[in-house]
Amino acid sequence: MGEAPDQRAARVAARQKTIVTGEQLAACGLGRRAIKYRVETGRLHIVFRDVYSFGCGGLPPLAREQAALLACGERGFLSHHTAAFVCGLRKAHPFEVDVSVVGRSCGLRKGIRVHRIGKIDRREVRREQGLWVSSPARALLEIAATLSSSELAKAIDDGLAAGVLRRGEVEAVLERNRPCRGAARLAAVIASGGGAVITRSQAERAFLKLIRDARLPEPDANVPFGRWEADFMWRAQRLVVEIDGYGFHSGPNAFNRDHEKVLALQAAGFEVLRFTRDQVVKQPAFALATVAAALARRAGNGGQ
């Protein structure tokens, strides 16, 4: 006995995050009337025109994006805000699915925003969870025109800090695609220093230079303290300075670890000051004044 049409359709859908097209259903032996009946009885659910989810459960992660790619046919890939969401540059799930299609037209479907492009550099697309998606650097360029300069700078900094973006890749994508919508804004943000993630070593060197230039007492650096390490410590004044990167409190484990460290230092009688790397490098007067005031206060009361 041959395999039943529903079994064949289920196998196809299982490979595509529950998604199957009308053409694929027909190839499995289900005609239009059979498809309509399965929609009415809840075995198939319409996602986009002529694209369905097979089964009675909710859509799994990225199933809607899979459906959009199937709806747009070959040579399509997730792009713009959808790609930014998939690769982690955007937190909120976009309402419409952005799909770029290379070298061909694609019929409009409600819920899909189609972008027709003439060509794509192979280095600018990749596979993510089984789907073709713009690379993070290309996605950044694609959404650059829809973001303010400050939003774009933050997206660059957050992406670099999280390891999603690499500055060289962003610059390469920009160079390959000029001129295009959003390129001028992205180039201006990069030129102004946006997206320049400050490393721990850069921030520590800048901080020590501030202290030395102001002729304040010099702290010990990277001091072991129990199972932790204090960035800068003035033992006599019982003062500690911690310099945090953009990844600070990026998850529950990091948050708990840093919170425990601060509590342990405070229990040992230390005052703890926290600065971001950006504050140390771009707002040195603020950082220096805060430390100087704390050192004077701690010295005046004997480090208590």
Image (cartoon, rainbow, N blue to C red):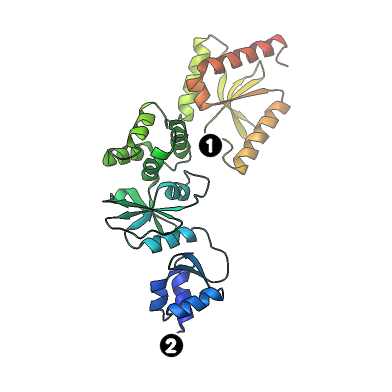
Dot 2, how many residues are within 10 Å of its Cα: few (below 14), some (14-19), or many (20+)? few
* Visible residue check, residue 130: no
Q: Amino acid at mark 1?
A: Gly
* Residue 177 in view: yes
The amino acid marked with disc number 2 is: Gly
Residue 122 appears at what percent x and percent y?
A: 29, 51
User: Which residue, given by chain and number where applicable, does mark 1 sit on?
Assistant: 247
Q: Quadrant of the C terminus?
A: top right
- The quarter in which the N terminus is drawn is bottom left
Residue 15 position (above or below residue 264): below
Horizontally, is 200 left or right of 122 in the view? right
List x then y, in percent, for residue 128: 42, 55
Measuring 56% from the left and 76% from the top, which residue is drawn there?
41
Q: CA distance from mark 1 to mark 2?
A: 56 Å
For residue 188, side relative to residue 151 (left or right): left
Count all numbered tags in the image, as a single digit.
2
Going from the N terminus, do you reach mark 1 or mark 2 first?
2
Which mark identifies residue 2? 2
Q: Secondary structure at mark 1?
A: loop
For the residues carrying marks 1 and 2, which lies nearer the camera in this image?
2
Of residues 144 and 91, the one drawn nearer to the viewer in this rendering = 144
- Give the class, few, some or many, for how many residues have Cα within 10 Å of label 1's Cα (few <14, many ≥20): few
Q: Is residue 290 above or below residue 117?
A: above
Q: 286 left or right of 81?
A: right
Across and down, in percent, residue 282 comes to 48, 21
Residue at image location 47% in from the left, 68% down from the top: 52
Q: Nearer the viewer, residue 230 or 146?
A: 146
